[in-house]
Amino acid sequence: MRILVVEDDEDLNRQIAAALSDAGYVVDSARDGEEGYFLGDTEPYDAIVLDLGLPKLDGLSVLEKWRRAGRTAPVLILTARDRWSDKVAGIDAGADDYVAKPFHMEEVLARLRALLRRAAGHATNEIECGPLRLDARAARVTVNGTPVKLTSLEYRLLAFLMHHQQQVVSRTELTEHLYDQDFDRDSNTIEVFVGRLRKKLGADLIETVRGMGYRLRDGGDED
């Protein structure tokens, strides 16, 4: 899952990005509203963390422009604790949730997990698909109750498929959501990671849809 952090405070931006990376997300960062707007308008993010007090273009204007352009990625806004009017304005402009500064990083992570699972239609952090279970909070995967050890990229790929299970996901879409903007993307590597996942999880859980991509299914469907 790929997250954009738009925050002008260099230290806070770095702290949020590091916490998200440690939690298994791919992170891009911007430190002013113009860059943040451009990235959010041109890159396919699964969620966005957006400060309202930004230079060049304020966060509220950035959010309004995204929504007018039809950008639907969930947005978590960061606000000053004593500016309740900013919270209201942010929600009215299309934000999905907010965190007041100063905040605990665990709260940001928890609210992002909630936004991601709601966007995918899941009610809890534990997502199931047949014998497969993914705990997004603990970044833990089990098959029939047995823990499965995955690399960070294997986990990211599986998490994206789990959030979009029963949907066909193209190699290009997977590549865009698994790597940050500066990574030298090669969709052929997706096939390698899918092969590794099949060996660890069972060959029947990830289906290849010829000419289209991959689909995660519960293992009980028959063609």
Image: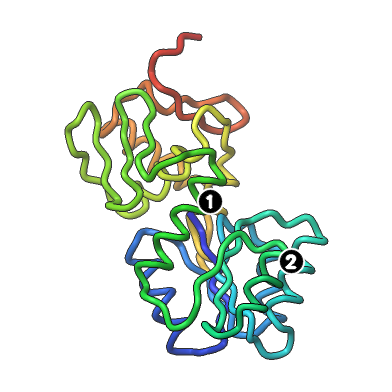
Nearer the observer: mark 1 or 2; the answer is 2
Left/right placement of residue 220 relative to residue 165 reads left
Please tell me how crowded label 1 is: few (under 14), some (14-19), or many (20+) other residues with Cα within 10 Å: some
In this figure, which residue is indicated by the disc labeled 1?
175
In this figure, which residue is indicated by the disc labeled 2?
93
Left/right placement of residue 3 relative to residue 94 reads left
| Amino acid type at image mark 2 | Ala
Residue at the far left in the pictured view: 146
Q: Are marks 1 and 2 in contact (CB under 8 Å)?
A: no
| Amino acid type at image mark 1 | Thr
Above-or-below relation of 223 to 164: above
The residue under the point 48% across, 39% down is 122
Above-or-below relation of 204 to 162: above
Residue at the far top in the pictured view: 222
Please tell me how crowded label 2 is: few (under 14), some (14-19), or many (20+) other residues with Cα within 10 Å: some
Q: Secondary structure at mark 2?
A: helix
The x and y percentages for residue 5 are: 54, 73
Residue at the far right in the pictured view: 68
**181 or 137: nearer the viewer:** 137
Q: Secondary structure at mark 1?
A: helix
The x and y percentages for residue 191 are: 44, 39
**152 or 166: nearer the viewer:** 166
Q: CA distance from mark 1 to mark 2?
A: 30 Å
Left/right placement of residue 119 relative to residue 94 reads left
Left/right placement of residue 111 relative to residue 135 reads right
